[in-house]
Image: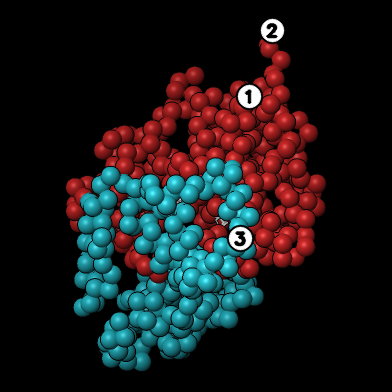
Amino acid sequence: MAKREYAFYPGCSSQLRGSAANYLVSVNSMCDKLDVKMTQIPDWNCCGASISYAGSSELARHVLSARNFALSDKHLPGQDIVATCAACWLGGRETIEKLDASSQLLADTNEALKEAGLEYKSGTAIRHMVEVLVEDLGYEELGKPVVKPLDGVKVAGYVGCQTNRPFGIAGESFENPLYLDKLIETVGGEALSKYEEKVSCCGGSLAFCEPEKAEKQIKNIVESAYDQGADVICTPCPLCQANVEVYQSEINRKQGTKLNMPVVYYSQLLSVAYGGTLKEAGLDGHIIQPKKLQDIAVKVVPAKR
Amino acid sequence: MGDLNQQMLDKYRNNFLHEVEEKVDDGEWVKMCMQCGVCAGSCTFGPDWEHTPQKIFMMIRAGKREEVLSSHSMWLCTSCYNCMVRCPRELPITHIMHGLASYAHRLGLAPKNQPTRDFSLIFWENCTKTGRVNELRMTISVYFREGFVSGVKKMWTLRNIGRGLFFAKRLNPLELFVSHGCKDKDGLRRALKKADEIEARRRGYEVQPRGYSS
Ligand code: SF4
Ligand code: SF4
Ligand code: SF4
Ligand code: SF4
């Protein structure tokens, strides 16, 4: 298999010691097995996310994204940029769309970037890690490295919003995207196709500032997974992962519930199925332990003969 | 900044729609709304919105400037993009909500102590200081924005979360001291400063409300 190469934009939450550090670990081990090489964009900066609007302007946010694009183009020419964070990916795509549509905005962005000695030339592509998996590699290829199928693990695929809207993954519907379920099944897990909260919003960044309102969302997201008999919730988004995992104890404290549903990334499922250890799959980075996956991860694979 | 509000009042008189078109990001889309109501039921925190996006667009046309700009509603937008994928006229509703909120803040008309506004400002400050978000510092400033005692109380109720994340190696107290950041953060800050100047030029602001002093 030819090695595939991409420029990598990890985003703030996935960087070392960030709240999604274990996402990064599992992505690395997954990519290793798939012969996908990702090189971090040198000196990348935060994209500003969707939440920074009060203090910033639209132009300033485009400048942040365009700086990353310019750096990627300079150091890793010709490579598509891959983002693992839904918000980074979305923000990047919005910038590309807007700058392509307006020569004035493009000129303004470059006037600002000049201050940092950089220039953005259009033609950049930014892809979500999931797009690389399902579009560039395809399910068949993703199934090949599986050495430990996730037999008997019931997974509620929680797609959330920003990986799904407004752009989404090509060919998928907004109401019922299927790629996450297909990924789960590709590695031998059982995808709970009737999971009702698949595309609901967890409250996003507002979990920080309006926790009570977000907790209402999160409670539904978790309870609906219980209704379907899930062992674990799986998501493509670092903020969803953090919100849905972390706030369960708060909901329990306030409402006397007993929510204790582990929440993992798709990359952790793949990594475990590919034979990754607890550490490699980032399964040592959870507050609510994903028991079933941890058990599989420590199991020794019978040597192939 | 109160001055800016007066300037805008003088300039646009009774034409709030025109003001929104010229000053608010994506504001030129507002007139395309056909009041079908599809977006009104889309918001994640729906029951908490006093004015749905549909209503806000109607109020803009009706010239209800104060009411719109001092509303809490657009600060409740979670950027879920439900509305945008449903709107038959393809209005970038999410962006208009952010744009209105941002403009209200710039004019000093946003509600006081609006939690999302405060968080958004802390986030931007945090992200532009070094070029990367420092989650620990950000979390601390969010919880302490209302003062020390209330911050301690909030931290206390959330202590289990912090401890959990700490043991899971995902929130490291070291972050307080060794921060991530761009090597060329000065270049980045110069570029952002320039962006603000350009923005002020394009929108015709005399004052330049934000700076990136270190
Ligand atoms: S979306 Fe969040 S995590 Fe991603 S780079 Fe932007 S601020 Fe950082
Ligand atoms: S579900 Fe939550 S975290 Fe995930 S994309 Fe939506 S708002 Fe962001
Ligand atoms: S993006 Fe904002 S305005 Fe649109 S439906 Fe979601 S919360 Fe409502
Ligand atoms: S869905 Fe679009 S057209 Fe309909 S009310 Fe909302 S903004 Fe207006």
Q: Position of residue B141 (x, y in %)?
A: 45, 64
Whether A280 is drawn above or below B81: the answer is above
Q: Chain of mark 3?
A: B
Residue contact at pointers 1 and 2, CB within 8 angstroms: no
Identity of the residue drawn at 42% across and 52% down: B176
Identify residue for label 2: A305
Identity of the residue drawn at 24% across and 63% down: B213
N-term mark: 1 or 2: 1
Q: Is residue B214 visible?
A: yes
Q: Position of residue B171 (x, y in %)?
A: 52, 48
Quarter in which the N terminus of chain B is drawn: bottom left
Binning the other alpha carbons within 10 Å of mark 2 as few (below 14), some (14 to 19) or many (20 upward) gives: few
Binning the other alpha carbons within 10 Å of mark 1 as few (below 14), some (14 to 19) or many (20 upward) gives: many
Identify residue for label 3: B158
Counting every numbered tag in the picture gives 3
Q: Are marks 1 and 2 on the same chain?
A: yes
Q: Position of residue B210 (x, y in %)?
A: 28, 70
Name the disc covering residue A275, or none: 1
Q: Position of residue B127 (x, y in %)?
A: 37, 56
Task: Give the chain ID for the red colour.
Answer: A
